[in-house]
Structures are given as structure tokens and as C-alpha cells.
Image (spheres, rainbow, N blue to C red):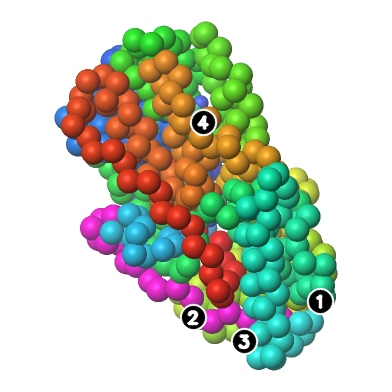
Amino acid sequence: MTMTRRGFLSVSAAFAATPALRARAWAAPMPRDADIVVIGAGAAGIAAARRVMAANRKVIVVEAAGQIGGRCLTDTATFDVPFDRGARWMHNPDTNPMIRLARSAGLDISAAPPGQKIRIGRRNARPSETEEFLAALVRANRAIDDASRGRADVSCASVLPKDLGDWAGTAEFVLGANATGKDLKDVSVIDKVRAQERNAAIACRQGLGTLIAKLGEQVPLSLSTPASRIAWSNRDVTVETPAGKIAARAAVITVSSNVLAAGNIRFTPDIPRRHLDAASKLSLGSYDRIALQMPGNPLGLARDDVVIEQSNSTRTALMYANMGGSSLCTIDVAGSFGRDLSAQGEKAMVAFAVEWLTKLFGSDAATAVKKSSATRWNAVPYALGAMSAAGPGAQASRKVLIEPIGCMYLAGEATHETLWGTIDGAWESGERAAEAALRRIGALRDIEPAAPPPKPRRRARPASPIN
Ligand SMILES: Cc1cc2nc3c(=O)[nH]c(=O)nc-3n(C[C@H](O)[C@H](O)[C@H](O)COP(=O)(O)OP(=O)(O)OC[C@H]3O[C@@H](n4cnc5c(N)ncnc54)[C@H](O)[C@@H]3O)c2cc1C
């Protein structure tokens, strides 16, 4: 790469936590023009930029944060193993492009965690109880499926069977907060059913943030360069940043739905109200991760064990223990409870995690924690949340978001009808938006029409309860 942005690189805490990226230093000022300018260097932005480069057109990515990755961010500094602060799993190995990309980038792919445990108080659920839970999940899924074929788009919570008994709270957590970042009362049945089944959980040993950073290595981009205003028309765009203006013939905008709805980028003229409304209706749920280093395996769990509990309240969590055989354990909190907890700050989050582990495993948990860290995605100014999920009646907003605005194209996970809330959805959306932008500027003509998205298949058995 030939640019240097050293003058305006700010050293954020997260940037400091990704030492591999500190080596990036470019030697000339940011270019002032491009065929296509991309806003945001998350999965969607990097995919879009690579697609433009593959078409031999000039692209520049401007990224507000001090590192590549957006909601895929690997912290390699805090613990002795990489800690994915955002996306961690790649689902659907037969179709997920990220798995192939990770392999071709020379990263290590590891299979789904083998063990999953359900705690009932201080003991593991018996096989018959686990069966009951799985049956409850199947019934809940079926009720949501059936409701999605009804006339009105209603909330998932409103259609759940009333007799899920002791498993109602756990089913709500697994299908709602843990899967989407929102409680089921805030999730549309149609959005939930259109979501492609997420049927396996494949990890990248070096972390998914590391993967996106690697995939962005050859991309011309400018970090710590927030787009503050975009002047647009049907013919061209000008993006204003603290480092100067960039003129381009088209733009791909990949900021999260919450960032767009918050008006953090000003548009001249204003973008249509329907796009802003759609972004608001696809608001991001809350999903955070509390990482605890617990040497000596004090909880007696296996490598990569996943633990949930039978719970009758939203004050619950999911644990991923002894990651990759290390002493790092993560406790994920989500939905309305996770949002309230993260608003109280990292100390309160760690205190909850310890309290939760103590409740499930006994008093050793409190003394066993040697180091901790917690994410607070709702407070990250360039994300403002975790992943989009449509509220009741709002599923159609995903289609609205992909309507072009002059020569600007929105991308990002929220714009994907079936893979919203995922890294592969973000990636595909970036490629799709880049192709639309390339077509607009006459750089792509003979493109085959995109294949229709695969029909979501409902599972007879629920997939693993891990996000
Ligand atoms: C805790 C958590 C766990 C998750 N787990 C999984 C998982 O296991 N599997 C999975 O598939 N997905 C998971 N996801 C979802 C996944 O991370 C996202 O769907 C995906 O990363 C979104 O990518 P994106 O490119 O659409 O958006 P982003 O990653 O948000 O990228 C947008 C980029 O735009 C930048 N930006 C914002 N404002 C500006 C501006 N004004 N100017 C320039 N740049 C700007 C941002 O800094 C950011 O880099 C998880 C997310 C979270 C938060």
C-alpha cells in the first residue's frame, strides 16, 4: 500500500489490542478520488473493496476506528490466547465463504465445540431432562414457523406454546437473546424464520477479527478516518473526512443500522426517510462477552464445553469454557438483561459472571479468576450494538435498505435477508453492493442474475445453542 495515515492515526485501546495491525504504515496522503469509495472496514466493507479491486477499479475504504474488522475484532494482547470480542463462529460450513477464505489465508479452522451442558442449579441436566429441553425448543420453533405464515408479522414471544414449563425461560434465551441479541418479544416471527439455519459452529483459532484484518491487507484503506458528511447525487459522491474529501462515482456504505439511524453521517441532500426508518426498525440487539482467565480448570469442565442453565428469568448467560484447551472462559450476556448489565460497566459485568458461575459451580469461581475483560458493544460509537434483528412488522425493512440511494448502496449484515447478524451475511452483502456499484459505473455488464437466497429450512432438532 502506498498511503500513510500516520498523522491522523489515533491509538485507541482496541487498536493497541491488535498488534498485528500496528505494522501498517503507508507512505503517501490519502487519495482524493476513486471509482468507488467504501465507508467502513468491517466484513462488508472489506468484501466490497475486494470485489471492486477484482474488477480492476480504484477503491478507497475509509474506516472510523483505528483497526480493520468492525464487529469482528480479535484481542490478541489481553490473554495468552486470541479473544474474539465480536463474531466468533462461522456457521453452515457447506456454504459459508468465510471458511474457505480463512483456509486460503492460512488460518486454522477448528470444528464445533463437542460438549454442551445444561446446568440445573449445581448439577448437569440428566439425559431425559436434556431431551425435554430439546423437545421444548422444537415446539417453540414450530410455533414460530407456523405464526410466520399468518397474516400479521407478530413477535416470537407472543406465539410460544404456553406449556413449555421449566424450559420456557431457557428456550426464550436460546432462541431470542442468545441468537439475535434481543428478547423474543422484540423479534419478528418472519425475520426469525427467514434467517438461514445456523447449523454448526466453526471457529478460527487466530480469531475472526484476525481473519478480516488479513483479508483487508491488500485493500487501500484509511483508518481513524470517520466519514462525517456525504454529498451525493445520481452521478457522484463526495465523502468528507477529517483527512480531507474523497470524490467517487459511487459509494458503498457499510455502517451498522444503529450508526446510520443515529445520523452520525450527515448526507447532503438528506437520504430518504424510508431508509432511515428501515435502519431504525432493524436496530441492533445487545450481545456482550465477559472473558475470565481461570487457570487450573477450577470448574472441572472439558475443553470447549458450552454451558447454559435452566433459567426462569432473562438474568442468564452462556459459557464457553477452556477455549481451545486454554484457561480462558467466556460468559455471554445478551438481550434486555445484557443491555442493562453492560450499561453498568465492566466491573458489574465481571461481578455478574462470577456470581453466575458461583451459583452453577460453587464458591471456587470467585477466587479462580485471575484476569478479566468485557465487551460493551452498545457503547462502541462506531457500532452502537451487536447485530440487527427486525422487530414485529419490520422484516420488510431489509429490502428497503438495499434500495439504491442515487449512486450510493447500503451494505452490512442488516441488509441481508437470510444471513443477518452474521459475518458471512455481511460479507455477501458487501460483494452484492459492490457489484451494484460497479454496474452503476459501467464496470460490470454481463453479470448473471444473482441466485435467489436459499429457502430457510426448519430443523427437526434445534441447532446448537451458541451464537
Ligand atoms: C458480540 C458479538 C458476537 C457475534 N457473534 C457472531 C458469530 O458468532 N457469528 C457470526 O457470523 N456473526 C456474529 N456476530 C455478528 C457479526 O459480527 C456481524 O454481523 C458482522 O461483523 C457485521 O459486519 P458489517 O461489516 O456489516 O458491520 P461492522 O462490522 O459494524 O462494520 C462497519 C464498519 O463501519 C465503521 N464505521 C462506522 N461509522 C463510520 C464512519 N462514520 N466512517 C467510517 N467508518 C465508519 C465501523 O467502525 C465498522 O468498522 C457477532 C457480533 C457481536 C457484536
Mark 2 lies on a secondary structure that is loop
Q: Secondary structure at mark 3?
A: loop
Q: Residue at x 49, y 62 (%)?
A: 457
What residue does disc 2 label? Answer: 114
In the image, 329 versus 443, the foreground residue is 443
Instruction: Determine if residue 356 is in view.
Output: no
Q: For residue 401, which numbered disc appears in the image? A: 4
Lower position in the chain sequence, tag 1 or tag 4: 1
State which tag comes first along the sequence, 3 or 1.
1
Q: Identify whether 76 is placed above or below 126.
A: above
Which label belongs to residue 300? 3
What amino acid is labelled 3 in the image?
Answer: Gly
Badge 1, how many Cα within 10 Å: few under 14, some, many 20+?
A: some
Q: CA distance from mark 1 to mark 4?
A: 40 Å
Q: Earlier in the sequence, mark 4 or mark 2?
A: 2
Does 83 sit above or below residue 404? below
Q: Which residues are magenta?
A: 101-119
Query: Which residue bears the numbered disc 1?
Result: 166
Let me know if residue 112 is in the magenta part.
yes
Badge nearest the viewer, 3 or 4: 4
The residue shown at (52%, 8%) is: 269
Mark 4 CB lies closer than 8 A to ligand 1: no
Say which quarter of the image contains residue 22.
top left
Hey, which quadrant is residue 435 in on the image? Answer: top left
Mark 4, Cα crowd under 10 Å, few <14 / some 14-19 / many 20+, is many
Q: Nearer the viewer, mark 2 or mark 3?
A: 2
Q: CA distance from mark 4 to mark 2?
A: 38 Å
Count of residue discs? 4
Is disc 4 in contact with disc 2, using a CB cutoff of under 8 Å?
no
